[in-house]
Image (tube, rainbow, N blue to C red):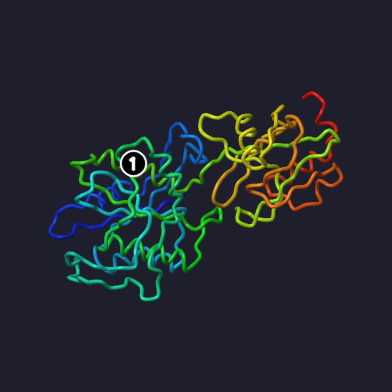
Amino acid sequence: MHRVLVTGFEPFDGDEHNISGEIAQHLDGATEVVELGVSPGQQGAESRSVEVNWECRVLSVDEAGSREVSDLLEGGEEWDAILQLGFAERRSRLCLESGAVNEANFRIPDNSGRQPSESFIDEEGLPLQLTTAPLKMLLTEFDSDSDVRKSDDAGRFVCNETCYRTLRTIDRLGRRDRHGRPLPAIFVHVPPASQVSFERQVELVRRVGALLTQRPRLRVVAGIILADDDRVLAARRAPDEAMPGNWEFPGGKVEPGESEAEAVEREISEELGVEVRPLRCLERLEHGYPSMVVDLSFWLCEPVGALGELRLTAHDQTRWLENDDLTSVEWLEPDIDFIRRLQSDGLSNLRRPA
């Protein structure tokens, strides 16, 4: 079960209601399974059914309210994700805020009468704190939903202040979730119920909160290019690539509408400048990183004609490895167990029919 904190605000500026606080109160204390439906494919959430316990708070619209979640984090409170809501009268959709700026410039006084102008929220803070939520995954999941969009402007009022303080505290304390990534937190501006009904907003908030606890799932293929002398080609990631210096079998992400075999052909052509023919999938496995889950498929391939000179675009070195040499290089973590099994079975046995 995932424990998610949802915050909203009390009414302000003379209004009797604040839909952000009402959504939080509606969810408070409930434990439920949120069904996420059919996966959108690449960058979709790792699980499609998520059990969530909602813990909700209604914050005061003043400096104390902007500090409340930060103070709880300082005191050692732990959640799997933090979802902060705020009302935006002029918005027509739920807006996923990409971050908050270190600036307070209030158009109206807050509920304590405070009205800073062109002030820093934190004199020692960064100019911008980006959301720690898996934003790309969220946007993928809501891509076809007209009631949700991304926003790069959280305003300069208490909403922005609250978001900034929360993200700043997560950053400063180094708070992590169960996967080891920065604790996912995002601010969402919600529109009036006249634009998106209360019931619909609750539904969307449930989805956002559940998604915050999830990592994106990626489908990846790797090509095992087998030479006539039973050696396989390994490639080392270039210094400007993710996880530089590690060795891998060339490959990459499966694009939408693409089969695994097609992805292997395309990726090896792009990364090495050569043509291969995928023969069969040798193994499929799942590997979890702090920030994502990878579904990795290893495909046995043969060169189409003579390979010739390789044109490296994502690697800085390649080696043809014999069976005894397979563990002589530093492989990417997801490849290690497969490499050991490959070595134990013997590269020459790859030519046998499956």
List the single residue furthest toward the left.
Answer: 14
Bin the neighbour count of mark 1 within 10 Å (Cα to Cα): few under 14, some 14-19, many 20 and up: some
Q: Residue at point 22% right, 72% down?
A: 117
Q: Is residue 61 left or right of residue 101?
A: left
Q: Which residue is at 43% across, 49% downward?
A: 135
| Residue at the spot of label 1 | 204
Asked which quadrant contains residue 294, the reply is top right
From the viewer's perspective, tell me whether residue 47 is left or right of residue 324: left
Kind of residue at disc 1: Leu
Q: Position of residue 274 (x, y in %)?
A: 69, 37
Q: Residue at x 17, y 70 (%)?
A: 113
- Please determine whether, in this image, residue 201 is positioned above or below residue 262: below
Dot 1 lies on which element? helix
| Quarter occupied by the C terminus | top right
Q: What x and y, as percent, mark residue 74?
A: 43, 68
Q: Nearer the viewer, residue 307 or 259?
A: 307
Residue 46: x %, y % from top left: 52, 41
Could you say where residue 333 lies in the image, as x and y percent from the top left?
69, 49
Vertical arrangement, residue 244 with respect to residue 48, above or below: below
Q: Nearer the viewer, residue 61 or 52?
A: 61
Q: Residue furthest front?
A: 309
Q: Toward the viewer: 274 or 157?
A: 274
Residue at x-position 48% and y-position 68%: 173
Q: How many marks?
A: 1
For this orientation, the residue located farthest to the bottom is: 123
